[in-house]
């Protein structure tokens, strides 16, 4: 057979075989994509940013490997306190591996905590610029977590990290959003037990939602594993808020078990004013408990210094 | 009657002999030395546990991420090694047989050219299979060792923090999903299938190319184009709505008709992230691989059938 004829037949044969596989290839790709087995193709912008070599490797089916190496690069930016570069690197990482919660939680943590804390202590910048950089870092961290939750709605760890950030009194508080994030995480059924408690503690700090918080606190308290000091104290305050006529001593003993435990736990809770937990009935209970336990006046919890109840804006004032 | 019955068996035996010879030929090129590098990479992956944020009761997050890291660092080199080996060893075989004049000796005998090609390809596939099986074994051993440590730490921390049995069990199941699972074995099989397709493509190119270098370079180009094939196909089907020119759509169509869709085999990324591949999905992937290999092998035979040396 003549060479050109052979090549034409070969080309036609390959095209025909290609046409045959069209019927199952495209639906199979769609099926794999909808089942989460295949990620969306790498965006052109991402390909440009990661460089030709890495793009070739990523396109060669090694996206997670490129993401792993970029994560090492991001760590170098963290060590060198290069926050803009770190943010850009994490944007690339999550483009390559959008379904790995580790990258979302670590990226958000670097932005909202490490970068923000760095700006807090940067003495080479004027206070106003530091405050703006600090706020901006936290907002970027929040936006990063939120993007991660939109792409991974069934992944509790990213939602839980978002909840922790938004209810952290050293950051920019947003208790309603924190409660919603914790709830979304807990509702997946795969979250750690502290997540539902986090939802309750966030709800307790939203004015007008105390009853909702109390209902959840009671349900959580029913499980002995959840009877941790903060939850018990919050339940005590919420019960007192719901019915101020309740006897503080009886209520405290019913929740904490004995006067000594009630005194110790409520005492620690009383000084944590910066965290903005409800304090209904706590002072009255402590006074009664101190009289029962014969606590000397100079050892009274009311003599202890309270946590400074300052807002983050105060940190930058006068520094 | 007896002669008729023995024909298929003798054909199978003939292909097996050629495959065995090709395998031995490749093993003598000391290709298994790369396993040493693979072991080093696998061990190194254990030391890249970077600090991260963990919730107050996150018992095993770090451990689970380390397991994911080990899988990523293992499957990445597996893909690279197998694709490189699949292409280079196939590209070497035909020119080497011509150079050693073994080809003339074989083709002078009543050996159908299809059997010769099938034998060579099977030899390469056997090499890929053995290499991947060894790498897989190393990966599974490392994962299993690390998994045992992670589970032990989780269980003791869970107990010390008063977790109930259901919570500890739930975390254990999540952690086990990051260990050596059947889905992971499916991902290794996907790596094998992709490299087998590349070997078949390299075989096709080497039937009309006289240079090993040309075969290798073109095969690698096809490998990367194959990862754009799905994009080209989408462009062909959806490009018309976006007002793109007919010419560019036809180019996209040609790309999607001629080149294989390698993006299908990127399921390994999802498995590394802990996703499960169903058996039916694995079967579909395998059938797709068999189709590609069969088409390119038949095309190779078509070119090679009356080639003169």
Image (tube, coloured by chain):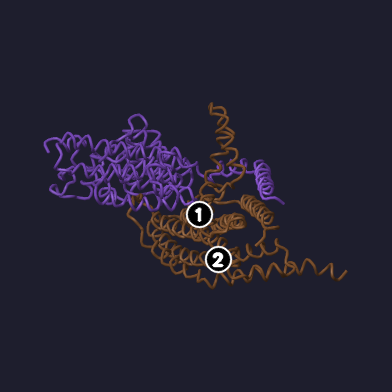
**Is residue B188 depicted above or below A47 in this figure?**
below
In the foreground, A254 or B125: B125
Question: What label sits on residue A229 in the rendered view?
Answer: none
The chain letter corresponding to brown is: B
- Residue A281 visible to the viewer: no
Q: Nearer the viewer, mark 1 or mark 2?
A: 1
- Mark 1 and mark 2 lie on one chain; the one further toward the N terminus is 2
Residue B238 vs residue A267, the one in the foreground: B238
The percent coordinates of residue A243 (x first, y second) are 34, 33
Q: Is residue A177 above or below residue A105?
A: above
Q: Tell me where residue B27 sits by quadrant.
A: bottom right
> Is B162 placed above or below B250 here?
below
Q: Secondary structure at mark 2?
A: helix
The chain ID associated with circle 1 is B
Query: Residue A73 location in percent, x, y?
Result: 33, 51
Residue hosting label 2: B133
Q: Is residue A251 left or right of residue B32?
A: left
Colour purple belongs to chain: A
| Measured Cα–Cα span from mark 1 to mark 2 | 27 Å
Secondary element at tag 1: helix
**What residue did someone put label 1 on?**
B217
Whether callout 1 and callout 2 share a subunit is answered yes
Say which residue appears at 47% left-offset and 63% top-offset: B143
Q: Position of residue A70 (x, y in %)?
A: 37, 50
Quadrant of the frame with the C terminus of chain A: top left
Q: Looking at the picture, tell me which residue is in the foreground, A76 or A304.
A: A76
Q: Is residue B200 left or right of residue A226?
A: right
Q: Nearer the viewer, residue A293 or A308?
A: A308
């Amino acid at each position: 057979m003549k060479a050109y004829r052979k090549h034409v037949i070969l080309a036609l044969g390959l095209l025909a075989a290609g046409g045959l596989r069209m019927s199952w290839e495209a639906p199979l790709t769609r099926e794999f994509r909808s089942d989460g087995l295949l990620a969306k193709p790498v965006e052109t912008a991402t390909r440009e940013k990661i460089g030709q070599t890495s793009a070739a490797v990523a396109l060669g089916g090694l996206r997670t490997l490129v993401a792993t190496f970029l994560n090492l690069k991001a760590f170098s930016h963290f060590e060198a306190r290069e926050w803009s570069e770190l943010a850009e690197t994490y944007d690339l990482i999550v483009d390559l591996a959008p379904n790995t919660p580790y990258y979302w939680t670590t990226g958000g943590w670097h932005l909202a905590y490490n970068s923000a804390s760095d700006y807090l202590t940067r003495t080479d910048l004027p206070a106003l610029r530091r405050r703006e950089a600090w706020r901006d870092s936290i907002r970027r961290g929040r936006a990063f977590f939120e993007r991660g939750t939109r792409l991974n709605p069934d992944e509790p760890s990213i939602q839980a990290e978002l909840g922790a950030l938004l209810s952290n009194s050293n950051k920019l508080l947003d208790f309603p959003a924190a409660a919603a994030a914790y709830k979304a995480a807990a509702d997946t059924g795969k979250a750690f037990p502290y997540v539902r408690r986090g939802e309750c503690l966030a709800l307790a700090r939203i004015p007008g939602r105390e009853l909702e918080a109390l209902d959840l606190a009671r349900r959580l308290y029913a499980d002995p594993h959840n009877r941790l000091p903060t939850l018990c104290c919050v339940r005590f305050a919420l019960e007192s808020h719901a019915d101020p006529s309740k006897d503080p001593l009886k209520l405290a003993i019913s929740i904490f078990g004995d006067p000594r435990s009630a005194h110790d736990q409520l005492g620690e809770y009383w000084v944590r004013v910066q965290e903005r937990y409800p304090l209904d009935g706590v002072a009255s209970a402590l006074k009664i408990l101190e009289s029962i336990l014969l606590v000397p006046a100079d050892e009274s919890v009311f003599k202890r210094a309270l946590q400074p109840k300052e807002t983050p804006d105060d940190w930058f004032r006068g520094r | 009657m007896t002669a008729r019955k023995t024909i298929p068996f003798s054909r199978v035996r003939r292909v097996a002999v050629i495959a065995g010879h090709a395998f031995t030929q490749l093993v003598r090129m000391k290709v298994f030395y790369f396993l040493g590098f693979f072991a080093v990479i696998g061990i190194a992956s254990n030391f890249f546990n970077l600090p991260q944020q963990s919730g107050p009761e996150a018992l095993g997050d770090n451990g689970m991420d380390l397991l994911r890291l080990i899988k990523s660092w293992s499957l990445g080199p597996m893909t690279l090694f197998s694709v490189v080996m699949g292409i280079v060893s196939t590209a070497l075989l035909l020119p080497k047989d011509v150079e050693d004049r073994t080809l003339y000796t074989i083709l002078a005998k009543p050996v159908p050219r299809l059997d010769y090609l099938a034998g060579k390809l099977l030899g390469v596939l056997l090499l890929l299979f053995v290499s991947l099986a060894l790498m897989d074994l190393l990966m599974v051993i490392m994962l299993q060792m690390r998994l045992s440590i992670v589970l032990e730490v989780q269980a003791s921390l869970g107990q010390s923090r008063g977790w109930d049995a259901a919570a500890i069990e739930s975390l254990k199941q999540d952690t086990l999903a990051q260990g050596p699972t059947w889905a992971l074995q499916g991902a290794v099989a996907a790596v094998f299938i992709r490299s087998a397709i590349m070997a078949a493509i390299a075989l096709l190119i080497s039937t009309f190319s006289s240079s090993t270098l040309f075969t290798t370079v073109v095969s690698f180009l096809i490998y990367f184009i194959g990862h754009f094939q799905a994009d080209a196909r989408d462009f062909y089907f959806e490009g018309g709505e976006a007002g793109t020119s007919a010419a560019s759509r036809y180019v996209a169509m040609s790309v999607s008709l001629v080149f294989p869709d390698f993006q299908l085999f990127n399921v390994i990324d999802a498995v590394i992230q802990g996703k499960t591949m169903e058996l039916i999905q694995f079967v579909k992937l395998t059938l797709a691989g068999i189709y590609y290999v069969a088409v390119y092998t038949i095309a190779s035979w078509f070119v090679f059938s009356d080639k003169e040396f």
